[in-house]
Amino acid sequence: MAFSKTLKVLLVGGVSLAGLTFGATTIASAAGGGGTGDYEMVHKHWHFKGMGGTYDRAAAQRGYQVYREVCSSCHALEQLAFRHLGDKGAPFYNEDYKNPNENPLIKAFAADWTIEDIDADTGDVLERPGITADKFPPIYPNDAAARAGNGGALPPDLSTIVAARNGGADYLYNLLIAYDAKKPDDVTLTPGLYYNPVMDGGKIAMASPLSDGIIEYAPMEVYEDGEIKTVAAPEATVEQMAADVTEFLAWSSDPKLEQRKQAGFATMLYLLILSVLLWFSYKRVWKNVKH
Amino acid sequence: MSETLNKETETVDDEGKRDFIFLATGAAAAAGAASLVWPFVAQMGKAADTLAAGSIEINLSNVPEGQQLKTLWRGKPVFVRHRTPAEIAEAESVDVSALPDPQTDDERLVPNSSGKVNPKYLVMVGVCTHFGCVPVGEAGDFDGWYCPCHGSHYDTSGRIRKGPAPTNMAIPPYEFISDNVIKVG
Amino acid sequence: MSGHPSTYEPKYAATKWMDQRLPIIRMGADFMTFPSPRNLNYWWTFGGILALCLVSQIITGIILAMHYVPHIDHAFDSVQRIKRDVPYGWLLQPMHAVGASMFFLAVYVHMLRGLYYGSYKAPRELLWIIGCLIYLIMMATGFLGYTLPWGQMSFWGATVITGFFGAVPVVGESLQQWLLGGYAVDNATLNRFFALHYLLPFVIAALVGLHVWALHHAGQNNPIGITPKTKQDTLAFHPFYTVKDGFAVCVFLLIFAFFVFYQPDALGHADNYIRADAMKTPPHIVPEWYFLPFYAILRAVPDKLAGILLMVGAIAVLFVLPWLDTSKVRSMRFRPVARRFFYVFLVMCFILGWCGAETPDNIAFPFGTNDAGEKVGLSFYRLSQIATIYYFAFFLIILPVLGLTERPKDRPESITKAVLGGHKGAAAPAE
């Protein structure tokens, strides 16, 4: 009897867990706006999904290149500092440089950006190359300037974009590849707007940012499982670039995902063992007690 | 009926087994609680951005002789003193062995890329080693610095000479990136 | 704080010294020996689970407050910094955010358990009312806390909820602006919300003290609702219920940990990853899941003030429940009719939650399509009205009338009798 009771409790727990997850997903998808027209959302199998999922380093590294060479002309990465790129769990992590501030690759990335600073001697505004401790610089001095430069539309910050959109990575990926979809007749576009079936209402102020071969991928060195591997350069198709930049921005939204999942595995395992121990203790204590 | 109910107060036959399971449970719970404490404690440590924010560059040629530049590094003032020949002579003539915190003047300077020290420029963390006040320059009994909080006297090399402070003022980690520019941190 | 005669006897000089001056060890010992009904099932473990939730929220909350900046220019970034740069911030922030959801999950189970087993009936009316008060302050705390990350949902949630006060006749607008400290949700609002969000958990902790005191004075209710009569009806709290609660807590933590580590954002809103923007409302504003049923009641009437009164009433009715239920029988295990109405009530609560998450004009149950090809059927708006009516009818009509008309099943004489068999109540599990 007692055992069936416990089963029941576990069942109730499981059902409420499933219910909560389902409920949350329902709300998320209900708010997701399924897009317009006949466009069929492509659901990619992302490397970072699932209980043991990790970021695909090579894809995320290429994604940084896409961001740097394409997206960064309008979109900022407000929450990221250059050093984040070389953190544990980040695309450019290298075990030889546990402190990303000492990683020459990260230093080079930082130096590739221009940072506005104040001259300590004169107080004048000056420009200097970035250092690892710097945050990614804003693209526009303020929102008004950003709007003025983009026909009234504000290019959103990309550092949390995957977390900030219902549908997450799939949303972003589809947004980038869906520009070719056929516009339904009931969507009318004013100048400066483009058709994109993934957007609510099908209208977007950003012209298709990617086109085949817009950038050139080079083979890269990826630190994985304790060694450096060379990954060949894929062809820079729209799909490839969209997937890569999505992988990079997914990392940017949730940079501690790998640490969290690792800690989660240990924690869940521990709790499971403790539950079993407590269960046997419980049976011991209540052994001769009818209830 | 009552027999069944009262059994719980009787000694359980397999006591050893019972003890083991209770001990194991207790130990596991304690270990879990202990490991949970670590994140609660560690979170108060330096965050990644604090650790990274780190270095400043100072152009020494901007400091005229006999003057001092004060700048902030890691939330603390750094003094760059362009010493006069008299001050340098005073700093070098001291009998080091008689000092509370024995250090020669050269030991308190960092050599440039050619391996030579430039005694003109003294770079140090401008914080009194007593309780962290900022000493006043060109003051005190030894022509160096004087801390108004509790009366510590430092000489022209920033060494403690008199008063309650235990050690010389600290020298921050710095290096010469050109003849006249240093990078602190 | 204990309603049973103390059996504690200090053994050592130090404990004797202590006992004469501040009998705090005695209090702890009495707590451990407190006679608890021997038939408490797993639904009774949620009290302990809730205590853990409160402690966890207070600890992680104080930690987050060490890194959080309550200023509109820094709040959003400071939360991001916690998640990215603060040591273990990636763990502590979701522990607090998911913890809020887990706290509400547990409190709802705890309340429904009280409802089913009649734990609000004499002599536990005050115990129940203190519990309702705790729940009310929990809601306020949850709402205030959700504003702090200063994302889009924070901002617009705060705007909508404080708008409730604007519906009060005559003084509404002044009241709302007094609450906000301005014409709209702004820095003054964020600052006071932070101060209050820090304060209220300690008020809850104090009320929990009263709640436990009242519990130990009146004694625990139990699944059959029969007051323990003899010593055989009860067991010492420790080790019997400490180990049972411990097991339940551990299983609960497994669910908690799953969300913290694998689905930290599942119970939140994507829009809260966008910095608050006073110029742009998100297309689909929904409160946190634990407010959804009340949000649905709010929207079930087309009048602003009436909607708010109804929503306030939905919580207020819980406070007077001890006097609405006229039945002398506590446990619904012996009230077959009331039990069925209870299950419908449960379903209606879920339906209200569902309605709260959906756009009112959308169709919940389509019957077909009209000439224009649009779906027709029962809209969420109508569905929420049906559920709202049932919600109130359950408390205001069904429970009062049933108490007078329903014929309860035979009840066992005592807990011991029920436990040792013969009676159906003994074999029936938690139900």
Image (spheres, rainbow, N blue to C red):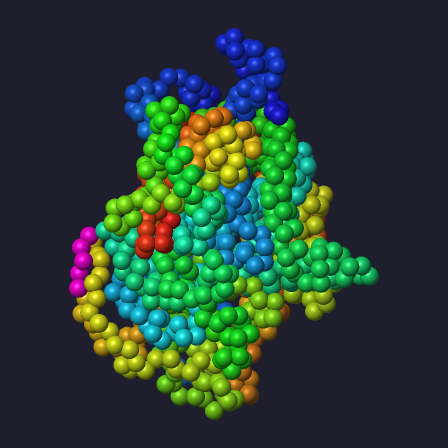
Q: How many marks?
A: 0
Q: Residue at x 36, y 34 (%)?
A: B92
Asked whether, in this view, residue B56 is left or right of residue C117, the answer is left
Nearest to the observer: residue C6 or residue A131: A131
Nearest to the observer: residue A142 or residue C263: A142
Q: Residue at x 26, y 50 (%)?
A: B113
The segment highlighted magenta reads A226-230
The answer to whether residue C420 is magenta is no
| Residue C93 at x, y percent in the picture | 46, 49
Nearest to the observer: residue B130 or residue C97: B130
- Residue at the extreme right: C170
Q: Answer with the quarter of the image where residue C309 lies.
A: bottom right
Q: Residue at x 35, y 20 (%)?
A: B12
- Residue at the extreme top: C13
| Residue C380 at x, y percent in the picture | 58, 69
Q: Answer with the quarter of the image where residue A211 lies.
A: bottom left
Nearest to the observer: residue C107 or residue C402: C107
The answer to whether residue A227 is magenta is yes
Q: Quick check: can you spot residue B18?
A: no
Q: Residue at x 49, y 61 (%)?
A: A122
Give above or below for A282 relative to B58.
above
| Residue A246 at x, y percent in the picture | 35, 69
Asked whether, in this view, residue C219 is left or right of residue C44, the answer is right
Q: Quick check: can you spot residue B11?
A: yes
Asked whether, in this view, residue C60 is left or right of residue C194, the answer is left
Asked whether, in this view, residue C292 is left or right of residue C420, the answer is right
Q: Main secondary structure of the magenta part?
A: strand
Give above or below for C317 relative to C224.
below
Q: Quadrant of the N terminus of chain A?
A: top left
| Residue A17 at x, y percent in the picture | 43, 52
Give above or below for A207 relative to C188.
below
